[in-house]
Amino acid sequence: MRGTVGETMERLILLQVGAAAATRDRVERAVEDLIVQGRLERAEGRTVVNEVVGRARERSEGARSFVDASVQQSLKGVGIPTREDYEDMVFRVEQLEHRVRMLEAETADPPQTTGDVESEPLSTEDEPEDTSGV
């Protein structure tokens, strides 16, 4: 029976870690044997170990990138959003909520008059009556 995608990914990562540790141990043993035989100096041996482990790490990272890309593609294929898609949606919702709050604040606070006498319209009661009779 197959495990979940998460379990499979965990197994792959553990396999990579185990392979890297085994590779380093084997390389160190091989280099130590060469040093004991006098075919390699200790400083050169350290350099060789670091180079081999570095190359193994690069290959491991390449494999991890390949697995990540494959998983992302599979998730997209079944319609599951990526973390980036999710974060974009959250950002858009936050922007919309902010706009709604601004619009609600505008409708809750009607524009206020300045109180200037010149800007207020005169009512007919304030006008003087025409007594000239014309």
Image (cartoon, helix red, strand yellow):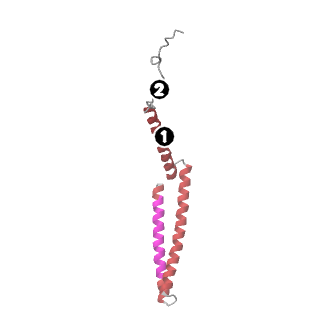
From the image, tell me which residue sits under label 2: 120
Looking at the image, is mark 2 or mark 1 nearer the viewer?
2
SS at mark 2?
loop
Residue 44 point in image, percent of width and height:
51, 84
Image quadrant for the C terminus?
top right
Task: Please check the rendered image and state whether residue 121 is part of the magenta-colored stretch, yes or no.
Answer: no
For label 1, count other residues whose C-alpha is less than 10 Å away and answer few (under 14), some (14-19) or many (20+): few
Q: Which mark is residue 124?
A: none
Q: Residue furthest top?
A: 133
Of 53 and 105, the residue lying toward us = 105
Q: Examine the rendered structure and indicate whether residue 26 appears above or below residue 99.
A: below
Q: Residue at x 49, y 44 (%)?
A: 95
Mark 1 residue type: Arg
Task: Please check the rendered image and state whether residue 24 is part of the magenta-colored stretch, yes or no.
Answer: yes
Residue 17 point in image, percent of width and height:
46, 68
Q: Residue at x 47, y 14 (%)?
A: 129
SS at mark 1?
helix
For label 2, count other residues whose C-alpha is less than 10 Å away and answer few (under 14), some (14-19) or many (20+): few
Residue 120 point in image, percent of width and height:
47, 26
Mark 2 residue type: Glu
From the image, tell me which residue sits under label 1: 99
* Separation of residues labelled 2 and 1 (CA atoms): 33 Å
Residue 23 point in image, percent of width and height:
49, 74
Q: Main secondary structure of the magenta part?
A: helix
